[in-house]
Every structure is written in C-alpha cells, then in structure tokens.
Amino acid sequence: MKANYQIKDILFGDFKAGQQVIIKGWIRSRRDSKAGFSFLSVHDGSCFDGIQIIADNKLENYEVDVLKANTGCSVFIEGVLTESQGNEQSLEVLASRVEVIGWVDDPEHYPVAKKRHSFEFLRTIAHLRPRTNVFGAITRIRNRASFAMHQYFNNNNFYWVNTPIITTSDCEGAGELFKVSTLDFMNIPKDNNKPDYSHDFFEEAAYLTVSGQLNLEAYCLALSRVYTFGPTFRAENSHTSRHLAEFWMVEPEIAFADLNDATDLAEDFLKQTITTLLNECEDDFAIFNQHVEKGLIERLQKISHSEFVRMEYTEAVEILTKAKQKFEFPVKWGLDLQSEHERYLCEKHVNGPVAVMNYPEEIKAFYMRRNDDGKTCAAMDILVPGVGELIGGSQREERLDVLDSKMQDDHLRKELWWYRDLRRYGTVPHAGFGLGFERFINYVTGMENVRDVIPFPRVAKSAIF
Ligand code: 4AD
Ligand code: MG
C-alpha cells in the first residue's frame, strides 16, 4: 500500500469509507471505553484536525502497546476508513494494526501532556511547543502568509532579490548592529587603540544586516519592481512584546514612484495577503478566533474591505496634544512618536490601520527624501491596533546633491560610494517599505508577543534552542 498521503489528504481529499489507509503521527489523547475499544486522537501536523483511531481490544498487542500509549507517542497505524458515528468528523479509522514507534519517557512529566499552558511557559520549551494546537496553527499560518506575500509580488511583476545578510555598511541605525568577525577575541589587533579590522576576514568591520534596503535599491534601479524577504538583525536591548534581535522583514522597492505610491502598495499588499489567508487557513484561524481574540475573523474581514486612514505627522501631533490621555513621553512637533502615541492613534483615534506621513527630517534616516517645505521628509509608518508600527517606509532621496547634504559625515559618503553611484547614473524617484513579518503574524492572529510567532525567538539574554 502506498502511503505518501497525510491526514489532511484523507480529511479534505477524496478518500472514502471502506478504503485501507496508513496513518503516521503522534497521539494527542487516548480514551478507553468499557465496550472494549480505545480511541486514539492522532495528529500529523498536516492540518488543524487529527483523525480518530478506533483500536479494538482484540488487537494482539492491545494490552502491551495500545493501553500504554500516551500523549506524545509516535504511532504507525493501518486500518480501514469508516464513517464517523459522532458528528464532529466524517471519517475515522478502524485499526487492524497499531504500532508504537517512539514511546514517551516518564509520561507523567511530559511537558506538553496537559491541554492548556501559558505562552510564557511554552517559550521555555520552544522545542516542544510546535506540538500544541496553537503553535501548529501559527506555523501553518506563518507559512501560508509568506507564500501569499511571494505570490502577491509574483502576480505584480516584482522580482525577489536575495540581498546580503553580512554587510559592511553600518548606516541605518548605528549602535544596533551585531558584529561579524573572525578576529581572535583574546588577541585583537589594534591600531591607535582601536580594533584594526584590516586583519579581519573582510579587511574591514562587518555586521549582520538590519535591512536589505540599500542593496535592494540597486536592483530597483534596474528591474523597477523588486523585493527582499529575509532575516534581519538588531542588537536592540528592548524587552518588549514587539522586538526581536532576529526577525524577518519583507521589503518591496518600486521605481518611478513616490511616497503615495509606496503607501498604496502597502495598503493593497496587506489587504490582499489578509484576504488570501482568511480564505485558505479557515480551520487554523478558528482557534485564534475562539481562544486568542474573540471577533478576530470579523476584524480581519473589515480590514480587507476598508480604506486605511492617512494623516500627516503634523496632524498626528495635533491629535495627540489634544488627547485626554496622559502620556509618559512628551508630544511635540519634532519629536519621534513613541509606542504609546502610535497605539493611541490607531487604537483610540482611528480604531484601525493608519498611515502617518511626512515626519520631521531630523528624526529620520539620511536616505529619506527631503520635502519641499525643508522641514519634513517623505517617510511613512503604518500603525495598527494591538501592534503599533507594522510598516516603516519612505520615498528615497534620488537627488545626489541633496543626498550628499543629508549624509552628514564624510565617512558615510565614502563608504556608500556605490549607493551614491545610483544617483549618478540614471536616477529616478523611487520608494519602498519594510514590513516586520512577526508583527504581521501577531496582527492577523491576535497573538500578543512576537516571541510566540517565530519558531525559536532570539532576544537579549536568550538564544537557547
Ligand atoms: O522601520 P524599520 O526600521 O525600516 C527599515 O528598516 C527600512 N529600511 C525598511 C524599508 O524602507 N525598506 O523596520 C521595518 C519594520 C518595522 O515597521 C517593524 O514592523 C519591523 O520592521 N521591526 C521589527 N520587528 C521585530 N523586531 C524588531 N526589533 C524590529 N524592528 C523593526
Ligand atoms: Mg521604523
């Protein structure tokens, strides 16, 4: 018998009662009935549901194996599909053979034997949490979301560019970079009391990238529509529910485009991706709707049909100044918005996604395009309830003289000679944004912490597993 199918194929494909099947998976629960049967709920991760196995006490190994098979045991089952008596599922398996492949040591203490655990506890067993319903669902939604994003770009003539993970430019937000080096820590060569990187692997200081944007721009100015989707690294010491030291970022970049075009793209991209997810992960979303955020599905449907509010930074500051709420951090034109301000704008004021546009030039990165008012630059952030900043983007400064005046130190101008070249040879207005993939997963599942939507979270003081 060929057995290259899974439980998902049986439950959602054209399998019928009477057919012989093989099931390979893990036991979620066992219930023994007085009528001489045991019921095993077996999952293989292929879909939210498992399949029910009926094991008759006439099986030759019933007492030695079936009656000892606990939650977590891996099993190989042969049997025949039968119509289910209960109304929950249409098919179950009447087993002719139940073989335990892997036993669970010390079943009393199997960490995920219990039905409900706190997310905090599950973080301490990140190697076992994929076995729970919620983490199975997150994993499948995460996979489908990244696939849907690639699909969106593919349908719209974007090319996926694999920008480097190791970089020598430290320009985006100095101070948050992880160094990459092969120097001997015990014996670092020095020049003028500073590390001498000319002896290092790349003969200069190198880092893990914080964003693929600068490299991506080079490809944008040749292929017009491109994106990068990969891991990014920030050595931020922020202990919040929204920051990881290693996270995944989706960054599209479009040529012949301004800030409004980038914001239109972001809005369309979010809505389309959410619509695809709702259509294709119905079972997995049901659990979040039920146990994590009541009304989640309705909220997501509403987003995919409504228009995002857009407001100027200046207007946002006015709204915050007039707000009755007391904020911890000051609000004043010229200061950056803190997370509490962002949350107020999208949660209290708009109650939905909001794009804040044209921030003061002073507080934003050098590559963002200077606006004609001389005070602001063409930057935008998309803020969403429950998460805060989901997307950060901008129109890029395409004028060499203005770019030079924005790169304040000489060192930057020298190091980024190739980035300046892009403005010397056939420059065009272009724009793009970055979406934090884990924050997106939080947004669509209602999960509150980015550590719970990435398989093995890396944050300050913790990179176990
Ligand atoms: O706003 P950021 O820093 O923008 C950039 O890096 C630009 N170069 C993107 C571009 O224009 N191509 O980061 C983009 C997004 C944020 O809005 C946030 O969602 C997410 O990345 N992000 C993080 N997610 C998890 N952990 C962190 N430490 C994050 N830092 C940023
Ligand atoms: Mg940002």
Image (cartoon, rainbow, N blue to C red):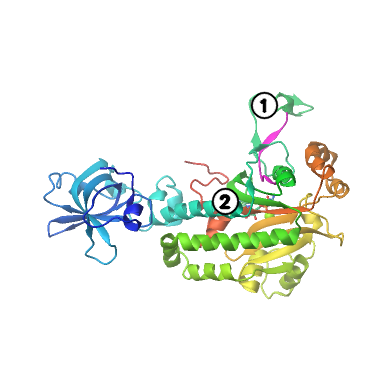
Q: Which mark is residue 150?
A: 2
Q: Are marks 2 and 1 in contact (CB under 8 Å)?
A: no
Q: Quadrant of the N terminus?
A: top left
Q: Nearer the viewer, residue 118 or 16?
A: 16
Residue 208 in percent (x, y) is at 64, 39
Q: Nearer the viewer, residue 123 or 248?
A: 248
Residue under pointer 1 = 201
Stretch of the chain drawn in magenta? 204-213
Q: Nearer the viewer, residue 190 or 26?
A: 26
In percent of the image, x 57 and y 64: which residue is there?
386
Q: Amino acid at mark 2?
A: His
- Count every numbered label the image shows and give the total: 2
Residue 105 in percent (x, y) is at 28, 42
Residue 176 in percent (x, y) is at 68, 44
Disc 2/disc 1 C-alpha distance (Å): 34 Å
Q: 156 left or right of 369?
A: left
Mark 1 Cα-neighbour bin, 10 Å: few <14, some 14–19, many ≥20: few
Mark 2 Cα-neighbour bin, 10 Å: few <14, some 14–19, many ≥20: many
Q: Which mark is residue 338?
A: none
